[in-house]
Amino acid sequence: CPSSSGKPNHADILLVNLQYVSEVEIINDRTETPPPLASLNISKLATKARTEKEEKLSQAYAISAGVSLEGQQLFQTIHKT
């Protein structure tokens, strides 16, 4: 369905747990081909994944080094600024 924000090339997605569905009724069958998906910026995704992995490893190192929870939170706050 169209985006509730009104932004072009966006759509609202609704997820339904099919274990709770007992009946499906087709109200309106679409025959037109959907628009092509937007291309992904693979290098940007890879950079983001690498950064998140480094952050998680840093957090794991802090836990294994015996740093207190307050110290970990302080480090994360400083790191974000």
Image (cartoon, helix red, strand yellow):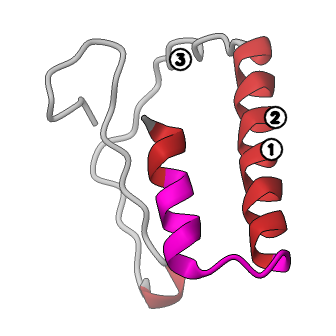
**Magenta-colored segment: predominant secondary structure:** helix
Which of the two residues, 81 or 29, is positioned nearer the viewer here? 81
Which of the two residues, 29 or 71, is positioned nearer the viewer here? 71
Q: Name the residue: 66% across, 10% down.
A: 39
Task: For mark 3, give the secondary structure.
Answer: loop
Marks 2,3: beta carbons within 8 A: no
Relative to residue 76, is residue 68 depicted above or below? below
Identify which amino acid the numbered label 3 is placed on: Thr
Of labels 2 and 3, earlier in sequence is 3
Q: Nearer the viewer, mark 2 or mark 3?
A: 2
Query: How far is mark 2 from mark 3, CA to CA?
Result: 36 Å
- 58 is within the stretch colored magenta: no
Identify which amino acid the numbered label 1 is placed on: Glu
Of labels 1 and 3, earlier in sequence is 3
Mark 1 packing: few (<14 Cα in 10 Å), some, or many (20+)? Answer: few
Q: Position of residue 48 (x, y in %)?
A: 70, 30
Q: Name the residue: 44% across, 51% down.
A: 77
Which portion, as a residue range, is magenta? Answer: 64-76
Marks 1,2: beta carbons within 8 A: yes
Relative to residue 42, is residue 65 depicted above or below? below
Which of the two residues, 62 or 43, is positioned nearer the viewer here? 62
| Residue at numbered disc 2 | 50
The disc at residue 54 is 1
Quarter of the picture holding the N terminus: top left
- 71 is within the stretch colored magenta: yes
Q: Is residue 30 left or right of residue 6?
A: right
Mark 3 packing: few (<14 Cα in 10 Å), some, or many (20+)? Answer: few
Which of the two residues, 55 or 75, is positioned nearer the viewer here? 75
Q: Name the residue: 83% across, 75% down.
A: 65
Marks 1,3: beta carbons within 8 A: no
| Residue at numbered disc 3 | 33
